[in-house]
């Protein structure tokens, strides 16, 4: 899946570099809304599972994203306020984690209804590209079963928990079809730390990932 996304993205990037004319910068403030999808490559990160009365479980965790495997797909949206070549925006990335190298004590470990990365970003246009840096909080919806004990998803806020912190660096290229409407190709790196509840304990779940996104946006 990720190879197909990168391949499509490279084609769009090549076409946009050859033919796109970026929108002219203006001092008039404008709002920009974007939606996107894609997938991610997750680096190995240490997972610590602590359960009352049991030995800690430590795993050099390998995660799959499975971007379109459930009713809650991998997606991203942004809403930003621009003036000239720079702006501020709010972004929410619906990331998904499935532990693929589960030890024997762990029957299920996934954060597939969202390892959600919510950030406030500073963005800047330069040389036809958009540079993005941001930080914020992680909101999770964990689904786990450890040593035969399942974590019920009725805690938190309808099963969602504010679980940690996150930061990102990103680079985006836009292909304008009109002055207001555009397609986008974005690559980003995220680094996050989260602590989630499990049955009779909790788990510390850091994540570092590379993301490839294809989307569309509208300025108004």
Image (cartoon, grey):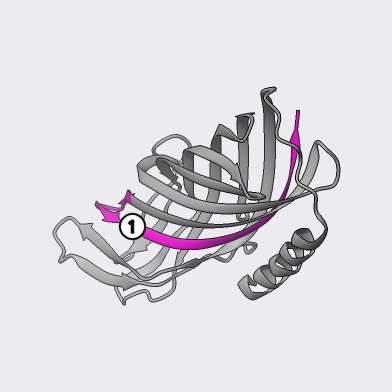
Residue at the far right: name it: 178
How would you rate the neighbour count of disc 1 (Cα within 10 Å): few for under 14, some for 14-19, many for 20 or more? some
Query: Which residue is at 40% across, 47% downward?
Result: 167
Observer-nearest of 34 and 219: 219
Q: Quadrant of the C terminus?
A: top right
Q: Position of residue 64 (x, y in %)?
A: 50, 69
The foreground one among 187 and 141 is: 187
Q: Quadrant of the N terminus?
A: bottom right
Q: Main secondary structure of the magenta part?
A: strand
Q: Which residue corresponds to mark 1? A: 206
Does residue 210 show up magenta in the picture? yes
In this rendered view, identify the residue nearer to me: 152 or 181.
Answer: 181
Q: Position of residue 4 (x, y in %)?
A: 69, 73
Asked whether residue 72 appears in the rendered view, the answer is no
| Residue 17 image offset from top left, x and y in percent | 74, 60
Q: Position of residue 56 (x, y in %)?
A: 18, 65
Query: Where are the magenta residues, as a range?
Result: 194-220
Q: Which sits in the foreground, 179 or 71?
A: 179
Secondary structure beneath label 1: loop
58 shown above or below 122: below
The residue under the point 64% across, 30% down is 84
> Residue placed at 57% from the left, 54% from the top?
171
**Is 161 in the magenta?**
no
In the picture, measured across the screen, residue 101 lies left or right of residue 147, that is right
């Amino acid at each position: 899946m990720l190879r197909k996304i990168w391949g499509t993205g490279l084609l769009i990037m090549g076409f946009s570099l050859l033919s796109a004319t970026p929108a002219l910068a203006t001092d008039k403030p404008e709002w920009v809304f974007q939606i996107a999808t894609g997938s991610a490559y997750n680096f190995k990160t240490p997972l610590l599972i602590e359960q009352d009365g049991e030995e800690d479980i430590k795993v050099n965790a390998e995660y799959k994203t499975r971007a379109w495997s459930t009713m809650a797909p991998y997606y991203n949206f942004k809403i930003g306020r621009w003036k000239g070549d720079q702006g501020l925006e709010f972004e929410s990335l619906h990331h998904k984690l499935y532990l693929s190298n589960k030890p024997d004590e762990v029957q299920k470990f996934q954060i597939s209804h969202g390892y959600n990365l919510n950030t406030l970003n500073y963005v800047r246009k330069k040389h036809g590209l958009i540079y993005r840096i941001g930080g914020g909080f992680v909101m999770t919806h964990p689904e786990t079963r450890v040593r035969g004990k399942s974590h019920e998803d009725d805690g938190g806020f309808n099963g969602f928990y504010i679980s940690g912190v996150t930061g990102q660096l990103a680079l985006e290229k836009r292909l304008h079809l009109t002055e207001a409407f555009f397609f986008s190709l974005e690559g980003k790196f995220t680094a996050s730390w989260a602590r989630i509840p499990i049955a009779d304990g909790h788990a510390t779940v850091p994540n570092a990932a590379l993301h490839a996104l294809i989307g569309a946006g509208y300025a108004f």
